[in-house]
Image: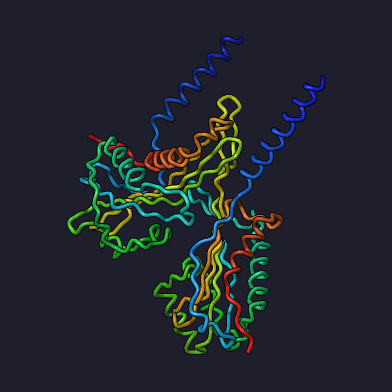
Amino acid sequence: MLQKSLKVVVTSIILMMVFSCGTVKKAIYSLPDFPPSTLSEIIILPPVDLRVDKKINVNLERQIRKASERAIVKKGYNVTTSEDFGADNQILEEDLKTSNSDWIKQLGPTNSRYVMVLCLVDVVSKLTFGSTANAEVAGYLYDKESGNIIWRDKGVGKTGQGGLIGMATKGLMDEDAIALALNNLLASIPKKPK
Amino acid sequence: MKRLLKFGFIANRCFLFILIFFLYGCSPKIVQSLQTQTDMTKLSSTLKIVSLNPLLTFERINDETVLNPEDYNGTEIEAKMIQISSNQLVNKNFNVVNPEEIENGQFDEQFSRLQKMSSKLSVGYLSPEAKEILKQLSSFDENLVILSQYLYVKVGQSGTWNAYSGAITSSNSSSLLKVSLVQCNGEVLWKNQVLLRQIPNLNDEKFKESLDILYSTLPKIKED
């Protein structure tokens, strides 16, 4: 009897693991019927800092752009970066959500087509009996030719460690939270079919 | 025995210290930023302030699902925001007028359209549509100034503690309060925003403090 229930539990766990590995996180928005194979080259523009609280120094280039570039390349896409943001980057978070096609067409280098905008929305670290950090990032992939948003999502990261170890490693927590948030964000980009 | 008692006393003090430190660390901090203040001479008692009802947006942090403000006492929060802003404006000698007093409510529709734009208006961002409405209002009275208030709440997960690994996390909910005074000619006279890292709660001192801070930089107009 015990053996049988144990078997059921183990099978369920394995099944859960298999399914969780196989599924892609659902993005907040993705253009219906858009095949990822058509994305010839994604150009990642300079990251935007949308934080209200800018107390923590963040290396946007390394922690956001380079880290994203590596993760997206791993998914099989051809990725490059550009220093030319094109349009006005003094933007509000909601402007990005409801971007109009005129603004989208101004983004990035003139000859580019698929451009990605990554934003750091928030990051905070706290010292308690230990330390914790939370981060929030957002990503947008635009098609300049049609002036549409192809993909839009958000990633949140929470980390922390209790006790003296946590207190001693407070300085590393925010970076860890950003990495987790970025991982969570990019999880909704499907692998490019070969 | 004496040594044991002494040790107990020290351990007790250490525990208290850790507890205070822990509680201090857990309390949310208020962050104020983006303050803009125009030339004081432009702020005078001749200006007629019309307060738009605050716009409240509650959404889940991880997927932006819009939540019902009523689940978080939205009506009471809105009333509190109106009460505090009215008190502050009166205390600072501003001439506050009711929207109903203006041309027998002719502008009701425009005010309600403007209120829906509060998320941008409250940071002083004027869309072409907002500019058009303000232009219409200024043709009626060029001294009209719009007070726009916005509360943007991101509802996140609460803090956790894993007893096996010692891993802890803290809540990632936040409330962003934004307010601005925009003259009908499109000039932003004053704006401020306050971030509180928790869900708004009227019984919580931190939220009350945040509301006070929001208006703290509003300059006082000299009485004639």
In the image as oriented, which residue stretches furthest toward the right? B1
Q: In which quarter of the image is the C terminus of chain B?
A: bottom right
Q: Is residue B211 above or below residue B218?
A: above
The x and y percentages for residue A194 are 22, 34
Left or right of A169, for residue B211: right
- Measured from the top left, where is residue B90 in percent x and y? 66, 78
Residue B110, image x and y in percent? 51, 78
Compare residues B157 and A146 and report the one nearer the observer.
B157
Coloring applied to the structure = rainbow
Q: Quadrant of the N terminus of chain B?
A: top right
Looking at the image, residue B201 lies above or below residue A24? below
> Which sits in the foreground, B182 or B69?
B182
Determine the residue positioned at 53% across, 84% down.
B144
Q: Is residue A187 left or right of residue B10?
A: left
Q: Position of residue A187 (x, y in %)?
A: 38, 39
**Would you identify the image quadrant in which residue B185 lies?**
bottom left
